[in-house]
């Protein structure tokens, strides 16, 4: 059983047709499916993993479009429910000239937060090898209780819990509330992935060094990852820690890079959980995940940009041959 279950939000991102403008200046937008857990789900499925999604969508055209998109990408939607009383969330994303983003989310009432504990597909959770989630689903009831129950059921059945808080400050009532909720489930996760910005936010430190990262270590944790955009990623386990560089690419839109990084990582971990105990295997997988994240930034949109295994290997091999040529 190698099932990865992703829990949380799937939304429609609207991205400007040109980069480097504010939302007000954008001449137009294109639809692009997104939402952290959904991006991760499609990334892992594109690399051959068996993936199911648990969440709630508005019973509207966008909701049905998103389910269809997930299924076309081999992510099973059997854990998805439709809510006739709420609309699917939309997210407008500005792209700065350097590919970084700003979000404006339209989500009132936020459909994905209407998921109730009794609506969870328990069979899916019991058969998961990994349950992956973010922090948006911890924001409000009834979804918060559903999220906590999903973690409990999956954990009891022996699944690894994978947590990527994917902080979107603009949707929280206050930074303090965001920090409190994000940290409220911290010590339950086996694998946690944060970005360098999230490391600063969660610790309140203005540094992102190893000492700061270790402030977020907890005894139940197996792997802590800090992603550093173009600079790659750092890893921390009980027995070893280090850094793996990323690849040089022409980045146009960073949306979903972190999710695709996690998708690649989880896809490899379900195939071989010993990766978590073996530093050289872990470094090899992080190199693969960095390449996956890097390629995701080369096209607009999150899901539209997710690479196949062949594309990742092509980038890794092309970079290796350039390094050989430089050495000669
Ligand atoms: P998101 O919130 O959009 O999901 P994130 O901030 O969590 O992203 P990043 O650190 O931006 O995650 O990216 C994840 C990984 O993707 C990085 O660790 C790196 O390996 C790769 N990556 C991201 N941006 C670039 C880039 N510009 N060049 C090369 N690699 C990149």
Image (spheres, rainbow, N blue to C red):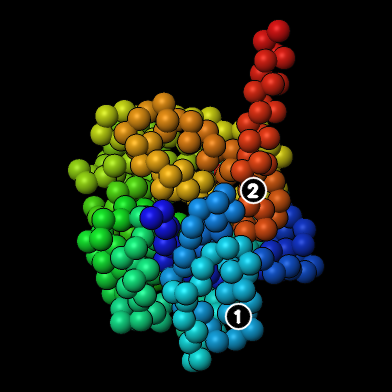
Q: Earlier in the sequence, mark 1 or mark 2?
A: 1
> How far across and how far down the image is residue 296, in percent?
63, 48
Does dot 1 land on a helix, a strand or a loop? helix
Q: Quadrant of the N terminus?
A: bottom left
Q: Quadrant of the C terminus?
A: top right
Q: Quadrant of residue 278?
A: top left
Task: Indicate whether 227 appears above or below 1.
Answer: above
Q: Quadrant of residue 14?
A: bottom right
Q: Quadrant of ligand 1?
A: top right
Q: What residue do we see at 63% from left, 39% from top?
A: 312
Badge 2 is on which residue? 307
Q: Is mark 1 within 8 Å of ligand 1?
A: no
Badge 1 is on which residue? 64
> How far across and how far down the image is residue 41, in percent?
51, 59
- For this orientation, the residue located farthest to the left is 219
- For this orientation, the residue located farthest to the front is 1
140 left or right of 261 in image: left
Q: What residue do we see at 70% from left, 14% from top?
A: 326
126 left or right of 235 in image: left
Q: Residues within 10 Å of mark 1 (few under 14, many from 20)?
A: some
Does dot 2 land on a helix, a strand or a loop? loop
Q: Is residue 23 visible?
A: no
Of 175 and 276, which appears nearest the observer? 276
Q: Quadrant of residue 311?
A: top right
Q: What residue do we see at 22% from left, 61% from top?
A: 156
Of 186 and 96, which appears nearest the observer? 186
> How far across and how far down the image is residue 172, in percent?
41, 68
Q: Is residue 313 visible?
A: yes
């Amino acid at each position: 059983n190698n099932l990865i279950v992703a829990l949380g939000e799937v939304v429609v991102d609207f991205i400007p047709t040109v980069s480097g403008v504010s939302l007000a200046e954008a001449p137009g937008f294109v639809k692009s499916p997104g939402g952290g857990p959904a991006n991760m789900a499609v990334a892992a499925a594109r690399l051959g993993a068996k993936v199911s999604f648990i969440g709630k969508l508005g019973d509207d055209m966008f909701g049905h479009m998103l389910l269809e998109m997930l299924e076309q990408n081999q992510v099973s939607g059997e854990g998805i429910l439709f809510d006739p009383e709420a609309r699917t969330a939309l997210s407008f994303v500005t792209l700065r000239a350097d590919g970084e983003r700003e979000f404006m989310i339209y989500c009132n009432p936020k459909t994905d937060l209407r998921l109730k504990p009794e609506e969870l597909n328990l069979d899916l959770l019991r058969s998961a090898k990994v349950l992956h989630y973010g922090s948006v689903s911890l924001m409000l009831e009834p979804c918060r209780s559903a999220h906590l129950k999903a973690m409990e059921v999956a954990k009891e059945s022996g699944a690894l819990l994978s947590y990527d808080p994917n902080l979107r400050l603009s949707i929280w009532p206050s930074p303090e509330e965001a920090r409190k909720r994000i940290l409220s489930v911290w010590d339950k996760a086996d694998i946690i992935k944060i970005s360098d910005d999230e490391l600063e936010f969660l610790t309140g430190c203005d540094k992102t060094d190893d000492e700061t990262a270790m402030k977020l270590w907890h005894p139940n944790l197996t792997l802590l990852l800090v992603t550093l955009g173009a600079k790659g990623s750092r890893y921390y386990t009980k027995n070893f820690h280090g850094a793996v560089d990323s690849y040089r690419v022409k980045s146009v839109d960073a949306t979903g890079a972190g999710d695709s990084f996690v998708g690649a990582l989880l896809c490899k971990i379900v195939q071989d959980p010993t990766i978590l105990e073996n530093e050289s295997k872990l470094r090899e997988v992080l190199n693969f995940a960095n390449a996956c994240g890097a390629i995701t930034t080369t096209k607009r949109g999150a899901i539209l940009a997710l690479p196949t295994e062949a594309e990742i290997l092509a980038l890794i091999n092309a970079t290796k041959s350039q390094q050989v040529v430089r050495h000669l």
